[in-house]
Amino acid sequence: MKVFENYHPIVLFIYFISVLVIAMFETNPVILGLTLLGGVLFALLLVEKKRFVKDLVMILPFMLLVALTNPLFSHNGVTPLFFLNGNAVTLEAILYGIDIAAMIMAVIYWFKCYQEVFGSDKFLYLFGKIIPKVALVISMTLRFIPLLRRQYKKIADAQKCLGMYEDKSIIDKAKVVMKNVSILITWSLENSVDTSMSMKARGYGIKGRTNYHNFKIHKMDKILLIITLLMDVTVFTGMITGNTTFWFYPEITAIKTTPLAFTSYLAHAVLSFTPFIIELKENLKWKYYVWKI
């Protein structure tokens, strides 16, 4: 059950843009930590547990690689820990690498959450009239990877039913996988042609074409929009005034503890954890009603 996806597309788009912009342009560890934690918790409620663990196992080694690569190429900083091939590996470079890895991981998880709650119909509703062709291409691209994943699973299951995986030879298994990929590519090309012909037959992008949608702004949409805008103003005020500024080079600066800095951290915490709280509340309510039956 995904409750957050029921909000109006405009409200959802403004929310996700706000979180992603702050995550990509802020290096403060407190703000990045809140962004990452909020995205991970929200994703934990949206996706299946097995898929969540599988994605985490794939993401963590990449993030570790990013964190370890920065000190090897960047030798800035005033606190050398040791020397490697005559180059200093500094504390500042290591911590900055960890910070960048946290930022990338936060962006990845928030994009995962966006993908789960912001379907292609919402994206076409927002941009279909303004940039119809670009909106269609972007919409198809965003749904392409999960669509291919589901289709590959169907192909693999069909091959198992035919006994294609019974041979334990690695070479034979590789051949089966290559065959599945070939089938998947053929299917994707046929699907692309069918989609383009279908959209053309329906007059997509033609001037004056009307579009049906069932999106209406309700009271909860207005509340979420007001919360998002208020938190944005507070966080961006802290960023513009330098109260959330944090530097790693040439030396690590202290995390500011001014009243405006604390207010900005609190506002960003509210912004980051709002979807998780909404989703958790509805999940607990649903389980409570099921338990009472």
Image: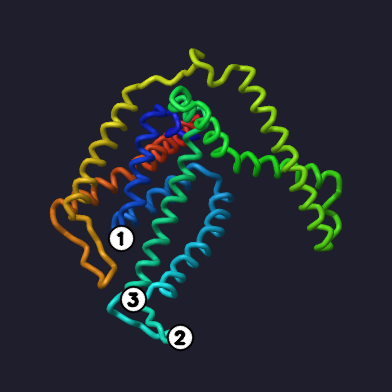
Q: Residue at x 86, y 58 (%)?
A: 167
* Position of 271 relative to 210 (above/below): below
Q: State the image quarter where residue 201 is shown.
A: top right
Residue 261, image x, y percentages: 18, 54
Whether residues under marks 3 and 2 lie with C-beta atoms below 8 angstroms apart, the answer is no
Disc 3 residue type (three-letter): Leu
Which mark, residue 29?
A: 1
Disc 1 residue type (three-letter): Pro
Whether residues under marks 1 and 3 lie with C-beta atoms below 8 angstroms apart, the answer is no
Q: Residue at x 69, y 32 (%)?
A: 191
Residue 239, image x, y percentages: 22, 51
Which mark, residue 91?
A: 3
Around disc 2, counting alpha carbons within 10 Å, would you say few (fewer than 14), some (14 to 19), or many (20 or more)? few
* Position of 235 relative to 209 (above/below): below
Mark toward the start of the polypeptide (3 vs 2): 2
Q: State the image quarter where residue 174 is shown.
A: bottom right
Residue 4, image x, y percentages: 42, 34
How far apart, in angstroms, are the residues tagged by discs 1 and 3?
A: 15 Å
Mark toward the start of the polypeptide (2 vs 1): 1
Residue position for label 2: 85
